[in-house]
Every structure is written in structure tokens, then in C-alpha cells.
Amino acid sequence: MRFDELDVPDNVADALREHGFIELHPPQAEALPIALEGRNLVVSVPTASGKSLIGYIPAMKKVINERKRVLYIVPLKALASEKKDDLESFSHLGFTVAMSTGDLDSDDGGIKDADIVVATSEKADSMIRHGSRWIDSVGLVIADEIHMIHDPGRGPTLEVALTKLMRRNPNLQIIALSATISNAEDLALWLEAKLVRSDWRPVPLREGVFFDGEITFDDMKKKEVPAEKDEIWALMKQTIGEGGQCLVFVNARRSTESLANKFAPNVAEFAGRTLSKQDTDLLEGGSEPTSLGKKLAHCVSSGTAFHNAGLTYRQRKYVEDNFRSGNIKCIVATPTLAAGINLPARRVIVRDTGRFESNAGMVPISVMEVKQMCGRAGRPGYDPYGEAVLIAKNQRDSDRLMYDYIMHDTERLTSKLGNEVTLRSHILGLIATGDASSDEDIVEFLQSTFYGSTSSLFGVEGVVEKVTDFLAREEMVEKNGSSLRILPFGKRISDLYIDPKSAVILRDAVNNMKEGTDVFSILLAVALTPDVMGLYPKKSDENRLTALAEEYEGKCLFDPFEDPEFNYEVFMGALKVSAMTEDWISEVPEDVMTDTMGIGPGDIRSRVDMMDWIMYSMSEIAFIIRPDSVRAIRPLLTRIRYGVKAELIDLVSFRGVGRTRARILYDAGYRNRTDIMSADEKTLASLPRIGPSLAKGLKNQAGGSSGTVAPLPDWDPDAEEMDAMAEEYCGEKVSKQSNLLDF
């Protein structure tokens, strides 16, 4: 079947042909006619089989023919950017595309005129909570990577958001796109959808186990690999030597760095190159180079790279783009890379099938996660085949890997909605939006979720009652019998999109603040909230964290040890985040922070982003219950956002000025807006990293010159220091169980 035979507008068919889409893949040929009829659809197909177009084409028809809006939900912010770019390549057909993944305390300001919005599940649910008018006009929802409903961190939010949308609009069309899963029929039953399941791939995939110099594939055929001192290098060399690329997956961040660095000299013989100064600066970390960045630049110049949560968004994107272009021959990555990002390779090598988890030690990773990694093997249009190889330590291990992973079906998808901690926030959201006004309404809502569709909900009434009792006790809702009514405090917490338990901690901390409360106490209260992921304490942290624990014993604005959900490990993880944030706002160089704390620049960005969000929530709560305390909190919010001492707060309020430029201005004698207003423009321009354009812009902002406001530079290295901090939260929100073990 051809694309021009589909029931789509002529201009869509023409655009598809111009993009090189002529013949439909078998899964597309089966799925697209169903989707284009306006029917609900679940598609369970392998990676790289063309499932994105099964969403894109109905989306374009819905917008162009029916003038209905489309919501495209993705699990990761990085994936949202990819989908937005894809859809925008067709926007000349007469529709607009927007991406909404950031501020959760807002409605539809930036998207109100968009025809298609790409959003994370958190943002989609947030828009519903804020009563976004845009949501009411949606005619099609595409849930990409819907198998993420199985994820303890993101799954419940996706599940709740889809349920709300379906209940509010019974005529809403749902298209759910998934990797191959064993119980896709359960998803189809829940969504009242037609199921299309296929094992077809454009590039044949062979999965196998490597041991004793050869790969044994799932069909029991074998392939010899020339011996090298290192077995991973042997597998890499064979592939690179044949003109292919490799992805190597390991379970620890440190391993990605050490292996990439280890193989760099070997790969350089095939792909070494000289980096431009611009590329080197970007990889090393911009205005504040780090040792991690320098290591990455060295690897990239040799044709290798590592990819983990310690990298900034720009570093990771550079690695991904240069792998796609062929400049990088091998990436050593943690499994996060496999979660939805389109980055295929000739051979995928999986070294580790275990992961360390708190209170459990080393545990096997899921078959689904391994299959996600394996599915990255084979580049359509480039590779004649794809190979996914698991590495065995001995014959017994080889047999285990073959049986447990290669020959095994993926686990059944199960809902992660049915526990008290997860339900707290979602039940508050249901009451706040009017989707529930009693315990019975909440139970009825849960019956219409994937959770309710696949389980008996035994005992859920007791959990619901416990949660609503908690919300009533904390004055977020009013409860008369089973009748529920949202209270102003609860509505604000729902809009802020934070865990109600976080709100209680922040409220108590605000009430316990006194004249002269020190900064670290406030930071610690914020870091102790369930919404902020702790940092794993390492041996090198022991002295500093122990001293802090002793200093603040009995002096915390919130006592965590009175709460059964906290333990000493959580407390120490929060202490480390607080210490990191204190260093950040004290302008400690990033390189010093990464070295002394054993963290990466990406860790700094992700935690700063979370601390920013929760500190903002604290200031909003303070405004409600104790406005006088806002004076102590708001300056901290600015300091966290920009990473500056208090003396630079006025300077970072200028557009185009971040922590580095603010310090340059301050040290040159320009301490505030008044100093900028009276400054000589040419003298300002002569300062490092200022220049004529920014100097004129600063004068105009300060009110110190007349005439037309000069445009500020499009490329702002100082803004890059912040590095799209929100992007770093993408892919990092994991289960509560493993937050502190984020290697």
C-alpha cells in the first residue's frame, strides 16, 4: 500500500511524498486506515518500524480536515523536542506546532493558538488542573511510548491524564503507540481501541549472547568475533571495522565514562578528528569547563562518547547529533538513552543486566528494558541488519541470559497507580478540578483507569479514605462524611503540581521560620520534600554531611524523623542536595563542585531545577499563610535560579546577564541598576563577555539611554550556563525506591 492511497488531504499526501514516504510498512498499512477513520487504536510494534507516522498522519488530518486540535503526549522532554521538530517539518500545510514541557504552574499561555501541542504527561495533567481552555478543544490524543505506564515515576500521571481526558470527552480519539509488549490487548481493552500488533522491522534484528569468542544468536547460529584483550572492544572493533556504529549499555554512570575513555585511543584509529574551538567549548562546559566536560571532549575527538545523566542537555544533544551524522562511532550509555530517543546503531552491546537498588542490592533489570536497548540495533537505510549482544561471564551465565532475556517475552504491563504515596497528588487533583466530590467518586474514577481495568481494586476504598483523611487533616479539602470540597490551600497545591506531603513540609517550615533563620535551614526543608530527588552520599561526602547532620540535629524547620516515610539515607541524600545548592548559590565553580561531590554537571542542573521549582512553591505557600516570610524566601529563589550570591541579585535581573556576566559587572564596580544607568556605554562594552550590543541593551533596560532598544544577541553563552535546566529532569524521574541511587 502506498501513502497516496490513504484517506488524507491531497496536500498531506504530496508532503509525505516530498519527504520520501512512498510505500507503507506493513504495520503502517494495517494501522493507518483504522486511525484515519477516527477509531481508537493501540499499536504494539518494534522500535524503528515507523510507528511515529501512525500518529503524525492522523494528527495532520484531524487538524486540516476537522479543525480539531491534537495533543501529542511523550514521556521525556528530549523526546518532545524530537517530535515537535518532526511535526514542524509539515507545518507549511497550514497548522502550528508548540511544545509545552516546562512550567507546571501555568495553563495555556504559550500554546493557546497552537493546533498541535507536544507535551509530557506531567504538563498535560497540569493543563487539565489549571482549567486550560486549549484542552477542551482537543479531538485527538496521541500517547507515544505508552508502555511507560509501567514506570513507577511517570506511569501513574500518564494513566490519570488519559483517564481524565477520556471521561471529559467521550468522543475523543486516542492513538496509543508502544514498543512490543506481551499484554497489549489489556491496553486496547482499557482504551476501547483496535489493537495492531506486529513483529515486523525494516532492518532484521538478531539477538544473541557473546561468550568465549563467539555470539550465539536466538536461532542458535553462531558468529565468531576476532579475539582482543577486551571482549567489549572485540565486539566494537568488528563492527566499526565493517563500517558500522555501536551502542554499549552499562548500568553505572561511572562505567560509561571509564569505558569510553578506555576505548578512545583504539577508536581514534578509525575515526579520530580535530574538534573546532566552538565544539570543544560546548563539550567542556562553556564558561565553566569541568573535568567531566574535558574528558567528554577528549573522547569525542577520538570518535567515542559517553552518555549519562551527569551531562548537560547541550552535551548530550551534541553527542546524539554527532552519532547520527557518523562522527562518533560508539556511545557508552546508561539505559536512559534507550527510552524513546531515536538513536539506532549496527550493533548494540549490553554489558550489564543488573542494577543496584537501595535495600535490595543488585537486582535484574526487566526484560522490557533489555528489549528497549536491543531494539536500537539496525539503522534503517544504512545497515543491512542489526545485532544486539548480551555479554556472558561464563557458560552458565550465557544460558541464563539466553533464557531469561533473549528468548523471553517482555513483562506484562501493570499499573503503578494503586498506592497511597502515588494517589495523594492525583486524588487532590481530582477534587480540585471537580472530577470527584466524594470518596465514592474517586473510587469510580479509579475503576475507569488502567489500574481499574486490570485489577479488582481490592482494598482501594481504604487507601482512598486514608488519603482524603490526610488531605482534610492538612486543610487542603473539607470532608463531611464522604463528601469532599476543595479548599483554597488545596487548590493552590494542586495547581503547583507538587506532592501534598511536600506542601505540608513547606508549610510547617514556613511557620517555623524565625528572624535570622539561616539559608541552609531553608534549603534543607526544600530538599526534604518528596519532589526533590536526593543525591547519593559517597565516601568523600562523609565528613561534610556528618558535620551538617550534627549541626542541624533538632534545628530543622521540618523534623523528618517524625515521619515514617523518611529514613536516615533519605535525610543524608537531602543534606547532599542542600550542600550542593549552597555551593551553587555561593558561586563555587562547577568544576570544584563536580570533583568534590562526585557528581556531574547534569546533576547540578537537574537538582537546581527541582530546588527552583519547590522553592517557588514554598514562596507561594508563604504568600498564603505567612506573607512576612516571603522576604526571606524570594531572594533565595533568584539565587538558586541563577547560582549567585545575594550581592548579584539586582544584576541578574537584566536580560542577557547570568552568573558569570553578573560577577564580571560587579567586580568592575557596577553593583546595581543605578550603576548601570550611570555607566559609560563604551566602558561597559569593553568588559569581558559584554560587548557593544549587550552594553547598549543593558543601558536601555536600566533606563540610562534613549532611542530604540538594541536587540540582544541571539546566542547567549551566559544563558547556556543555565543549560535548559528543565531538560535535565527529563529521563531522570525514577521510582521513589531508586531516587537516591541515581548513579
Image (cartoon, rainbow, N blue to C red):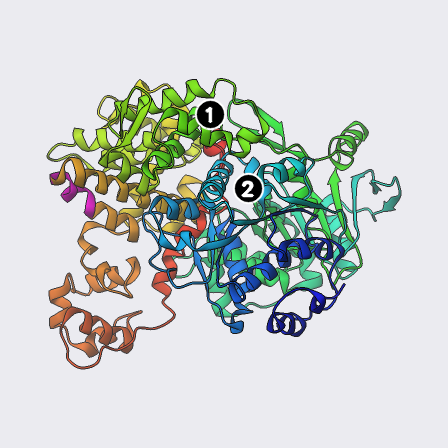
599 to the left or right of 645: right
| Residue lying furthest front | 171
Task: Please tell me whether residue 298 belongs to the stretch shown in magenta.
Answer: no
Which residue is located at x 17 percent, y 30 percent?
511
- Number of the front mark, 1 or 2: 1
Q: Which numbered circle lies on residue 419?
A: 1
Q: Position of residue 252 (x, y in %)?
A: 57, 39
- What are the residue bounds of the magenta stretch? 628-634
Q: Determine whether, in the image, residue 548 is placed left or right of residue 725.
A: left
Mark sitting on residue 115: none
- The 10 Å Cα crowd at callout 1, few under 14, some 14 to 19, many 20 or more, is few
Would you name the residue on which mark 2 appears?
Answer: 254
* Residue 545 versus residue 309 in the image, above or below: above
**Helix, strand or loop status at disc 2:** helix
Whether residue 380 sits left or right of residue 582 in the image: it is: right
Q: Which residue is drawn at 36% across and 36% down?
A: 429
Please name the amino acid that badge 1 sits on: Asn
Indicate the quadrant containing the N terminus: top left, top right, bottom left or bottom right: bottom right
325 sits left or right of 358 in the view: right
Main SS of residues in magenta: helix
Residue 312 visible: yes
Q: Quadrant of residue 299?
A: bottom right
Task: Mark yes or no: residue 294 visible.
Answer: no
Which of the two labelled residues, at mark 1 and mark 2, occupies the earlier sequence position? 2
- In percent of width and height, residue 18 lies at 65, 74
